[in-house]
Amino acid sequence: MHSPKVEQVEQVEQVEAPDQEAAIQRNPHTDFAAVETKRPLYEVHQSLNITKTPNPSWQPGDGASNQDWKSQKSVSIDPYEEGRGPWLNYKLLTSATVPRPIALASTVSADGKTANLAPFSFWQCAAVDPPMYSISFTGRAVNDTLANLLATKEMCISMTSDWLIEAANFASVNAPRHVSEWRLAGLTPKASDLVQPAHVAESPYSVECKLHSVQDFYAKTDPTVRTSTMVVVEVVRFHVWDDALSDDRATADMAKLRPVFRAGGIMYGPCSDAFELPRPAAFRELRVDEAVQSLIAEESSE
């Protein structure tokens, strides 16, 4: 396990951390406040709406539920074509890989003096036994969260629910290393059981984690330049609100969690609509179905 070099910066001289937003330019609006005034209010008390599946009459072999794809023209893009910078690939990845959950990651500096809090949407389940999450830090500079995690080997991850999305978003401010985002965001640190970093009291789901492994990635055009780091962390303690947890303590209720997803640009969304879709029956049962037998026969004859 190797770690990217963490540059030492004099706290008294550091006005702010590197400003990646200026390079990304993800906000498409020149005056967002004016645009937002024309939009309807967010449904704060909207309940989870469970619908039928998109095509309840779907049968084995049916494929897509409509034929619109046949009229679509696909554009092929070389991620390294001339004039295409890494941020263009970043924008395409984040706008197409949706929805993504938002992790509110909390860490503590190596000297224990500064508690850091920041949102990350490059976050996902990685393993079950032991329970693991992966989280990626993009950009050539080592941000505070990654620096703290590499130094202390500990972090907490809290779910971003809709009632704390504005606070979570503000925690992304490029404050200098010695300034904590907790107070800036107005969120409440709750003491953890096994790790030093606190987790977010306002979040219905949080996990305490220990660092498991680190993988650095380097620029394709210049293998000496580190462009991102992915870490895998092991969950050592779950924290779930009682009314969001099933009796067997195995399932969380999405209607109670009210998670917010991240899309591209400055777009977010609630997970307020859902449908249930059972997995296929065991093949030993399906193989006696005439339609499935016909599909298998067709494949064998090709």
Image (tube, grey):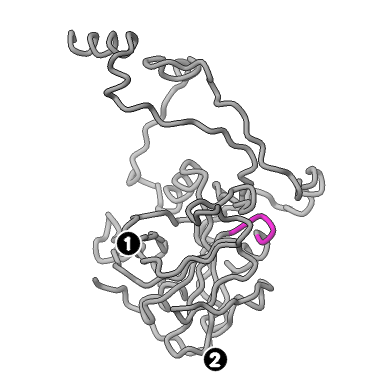
Going from the N terminus, do you reach mark 2 or mark 1 first? 2
Q: Amino acid at mark 2?
A: Val
SS at mark 1?
Answer: loop
Q: What separation in Å lies between label 2 and label 1 (alpha carbons)?
A: 42 Å
Q: Position of residue 140 (x, y in %)?
A: 39, 67
Q: Which residue is mark 2?
A: 12
Question: Secondary structure beneath disc 2?
Answer: helix
Up the image or down, 62 lies above or below 8; here it is: above
> 184 and 83: which one is in front?
184
- At which x and y percent is residue 175? 57, 76
Among the 4 quarters of the image, the one containing residue 115 = bottom right
Q: Are marks 2 and 1 in contact (CB under 8 Å)?
A: no
Asked if residue 114 lies left or right of residue 79, the reply is right
Q: Is residue 113 left or right of residue 86?
A: right
The part of the image, by quadrant, that contains residue 195 is bottom left
Amino acid carrying label 1: it is Pro
Q: Nearer the viewer, residue 211 or 171?
A: 211
Disc sitting over residue 108 in the figure: none
Queried whether the magenta region covers residue 163, the answer comes back as yes
Q: Nearer the viewer, residue 286 or 112?
A: 286
The residue that disc 1 covers is: 130
Rendering coords of residue 120 (x, y %): 50, 61
The dominant secondary structure in magenta is helix
Q: Which residues are magenta?
A: 160-164
Q: Is residue 189 left or right of residue 232?
A: right
Say which quadrant the N terminus sits in.
bottom left
